[in-house]
Image (cartoon, helix red, strand yellow):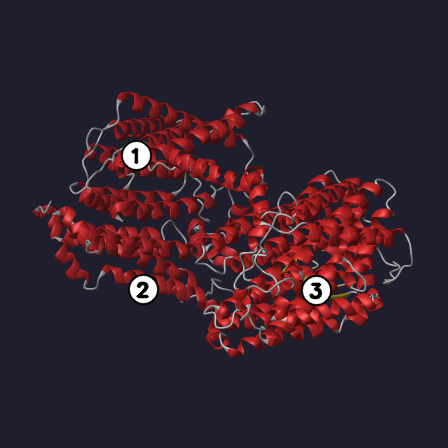
Amino acid sequence: MLAAILSGFLFSLFLVVAGKYFRGKLAVLSAIIPLGLFIYFFSFIGRVSNGEVIRQSYEWVPSFGLNLHFTLDGLSLLFSLLITGIGFLVFAYTASYLKGHSYLDRFYGYLGIFMGAMLGLVLSDNLLSMFLFWELTSISSFFLIGFNNTSEASRKSAVLALAITGTGGFLLLAGALLLGSVAGTYSISEMLSLSGAIAQSEYYLWIVLLLFGAAFTKSAQFPFHFWLPGAMKAPTPVSTYLHSATMVKAGIYLLLRFTPVLGNTELWNTTLIIVGGITMFYAAVHTLFRTDLKGVLAYSTISVLGLLVFLIGLGTQYALTAAAVYIIVHALYKATLFLVTGIIDHETGTRDITVLSGLRKVMWPVAIIGFLAAISSAGMPPTVGFVGKDLVYEATLQMEEWSVILTIIAIATNILVLYAGFVVGIKPFTGKLPEDYSKVHMPPMLMWVPPAILAVLGLIVGVFPSIIDGPLIKPVVDAVGGAGSEVHLKLWHGFNLVLLLSAITLAVGITLYFVLKPSAKREEAIAKFEVVSPKNLVTEFGRNFRKLSEVWTGLFQNGFLRNYVSTIILFLILLVGYSLFTTDRGFPLDLTSFSRVTYYEMVIMGVMFLSVLFVVGAKSRLTAVVAMGIVGYAICLLFVIYSAPDLAMTQFSIDTLTVILFVLVLSSLPKYLSITDYKMRIKDGILSSLFGILITLISLEVLAEPVNKEISEFYADNAYVLAHGKNVVNVILVDFRGTDTLIEISVLTVAALGVFSLLKLRLRKDERNIND
Amino acid sequence: MEILLAIMVGTLYAAGIYMILRRSLVKLIIGIILLGNGANLLIFLLGRIAKGQPPIIPEASKTFLEAYSDPLPQALILTAIVISFGLQSFAIILVKRAHKVVKTDDLDEMNATDEYS
Amino acid sequence: MRTLILKTASNYMLPLLLVFSVFILLRGHYLPGGGFVGGLIASIAFVLHAFANGLETTKELIRIHPGFLMPTGLGLAFVSGIGPLFTDKPFMTGLWFPELPPPLSVLGNIGTALFFDIGVYFVVLGVTLTIIFSISEST
């Protein structure tokens, strides 16, 4: 399975070097990869439908608990087949759709990365690796939305999408870490047995909310839905693949995957029903106001995503079956509609529904494909959409509470989704053919065969729903709702309430389609509300946040070294001082343990203190340097007294060299300035005195604590035994910590080279001018 | 003596910070040197000080027979002293060069040197 | 600064200090001293000589550019670090030669650590001389 995931990445890597050969006719060959993967995953259907769960694991960073565990159960298999199957058709379609595009190889590279990441996401059993793949899908989506990088709208939409899904990724990471620490493992399959304990945990609320945040942003749930219509700026194959069939369903996948771990609580179900319900209805209403074919499709996609969340929220076995079926239904008809839209766009150059009509006369096979997809989205028999819609109604009707309201919302949404499907799949092909489009011709085979395959599949599965229930749907329901589910899909249920509701849906929807023609006027009307839309609020927030950060940066990153230092010191004083004085541990200073002060030590300290005062108060550079030298020699004496001969020798030599260095450069150094005024000096004086006092207090505090000499003792005990040396300091430097010393002398070398090059480097022209 | 040393460390830190807060370039370097000295002394002090017990194993024996002062902080400080020489010389030359290019030694006037880079 | 006394003194001081620095370097494993201190003392010796006799005289005396001492020392230290790898021991493990016969035994055990220390000596000497020489040249 690792090879399957990596193949997408390797393919993109391969395109980096061999890309130029794939811009031309060879492009279609790239479809071999998803096809091969599809066949590979298809071969697992038998084993998985028998209830087997295939696991493979590779160690990656075992110390972080980050392993590449891959699990293939019913849920993963369904998604893998979607990713590779739709992927195959999209890869092939793109070869013709973007034929001759100068960045075609780049496009395939992004698609390859996306496919690999998405496969990784649905196959990962480890939460952390799942997060990594999750982020990779967001990033590849960013590049694909902004593929037309010369268009400003594309770039803006790409950034917006990345901002929203990136926030979701962050929430997922936070949720994953929290969940991992509560469960004690990052393995999802191990969490299954811990679901009770996790639900009892005090962090349960946070875990669920964080994961919801991730799922809702990725799957475009209200109020985070707005990035998806913007993402339609991407070339149509991308919209088909990422923003309808697979990537946006990653959130759905996450929710399904964690239903057995976190689900079946009131918080889980109620939130999902409410959010899903609002999303599906809100987005469905929006389709009425769009005139761009892809705009209509985007909102109907959001609506269906809402429906899926809603179904997961219902949580019954019927609802989960309905969700699983609906994922397939939606992938089949929505991908078809997107691809058909792509054909229309490609051949006529417009996606404006108000001007498109009568295209059946020039491209009748496409019209049939569009019609099949439209009736599937409408849920008409004998398409698979009918099976899906029936299951949805049954699921809502079976709820013990609120069933009437839930059913009404579902019906209303379905009516509007039907309208959207008809507008895209039927409207452009009916009516009179305008003069302008009389020369429009059929697209190449490569473009109309993929949607045809999907449309025909929708029809076949609709007539014989039993071919998917056992092999595909049941394993999904088993994986999500627990083993032993009974799934039997039928096209015809006999005359009952559900059929009546279906009939109502169809009647109202078709009436709506004939009464309500899409018009630009309505689109303008709704634009007035744009100000309060979530999208506008978020972009406004972004703009103001940037302003705020500009002000903030201007305030703190002002280029004045003094301000930086004083800010840092001030905060240090406040924070450390606060904790020093608020934690009450007395001041257990044992004076008896301290050594006594002899008179010569008094003298050294006195000299040192005076020298420091001289350094600070000196009016000339020479005084300051000499006084500083004295401070150094005084420290050297302290080292002598307190048994550190090595240090004393080093300090003495370095101090001498420093003074020599200063004397050498003093003449060419700038004059000693005292620019700051009296008030400033007092302020700085107080600040630095406070800091000094703080350091003194901290060191006394540390001195009062017992000391741990374990490491030193090891070095001292083994200095001769292991390293044949008796000067322990030297032994530590050249033997025990030899590598550190090696690096240290390298640093010294770098410093010397820096000095050398700063001095010898010839001044550039502009610098010379300044000096002249 | 430890108390005196602790006060001395505090004094060195205070003086170092005060010098860094000045606007003169040379004072900045002197401040850095003072701060470095303060830090060395602080590490030395916190490793506990003792008189007349250098961490050197007596000639006749293979391990320490009596108490010895902690060799670890000494090793740390030794490298710190040498490194600080590298730092100081580099800082001095940097200041010299900056002074030459920007023609000012007022740090407040060096806050917009982007045009010179 | 070029007084006669300093000039005369430095002529004798240089070899003396150099010998002293080598002595400090070699005894470092047993008594206070070592590569760092030895290198610093040696560089002080050269700097003193340069003060008394002028930089050019000192440079002639050294013959090679002090900068070359840095890679030499680094190389020596590194080689003494990787030496143990040839005897299947980890990087930087100390290797020791057998005890030396009586006249040389004052040096104590000779091992890779000594070569490492000599490397440190050269680097420190090279670094300080490079810094000080290039600074005094530029002013």
Secondary structure at badge 1 equals: helix
The numbered mark at residue A72 is none
- Residue closest to the eye, A572 or A628: A572
Question: Given the image, what chain letter belongs to the residue carrying mark 1?
Answer: A
Mark 3 closeness class: few <14, some 14–19, many ≥20 residues within 10 Å: many
In the displayed structure, B45 sits above or below A283; it is above
- Residue closest to the eye, A458 or A699: A458
Same chain, labels 2 and 1: no
Say which quarter of the image contains residue A399.
top right
In the displayed structure, B85 sits above or below A458; it is above
The numbered mark at residue A371 is 3
Say which quarter of the image contains residue B22.
top left
Mark 3 or mark 1, which is nearer the start of the sequence?
A: 3
Give percent across and percent down for residue C30. 41, 53
- Nearer to us of marks 1 and 3 is 3
Q: Mark 1 — residue?
A: A631
Q: Mark 2 — residue?
A: C72
Marks 1/3 in contact by CB < 8 Å: the verdict is no
Say which quarter of the image contains residue C82.
bottom left
Could you tell me which residue is drawn at 32 percent across and 56 percent down? A749
Could you tell me which residue is drawn at 40 percent across and 38 percent down? B39
Secondary structure at badge 2 equals: helix
Question: Given the image, what chain letter belongs to the residue carrying mark 2?
Answer: C
Question: Given the image, what chain letter belongs to the residue carrying mark 3?
Answer: A
Between the residue at mark 3 and the residue at mark 2, the CA separation in whole angstroms equals 81 Å
Same chain, labels 1 and 3: yes
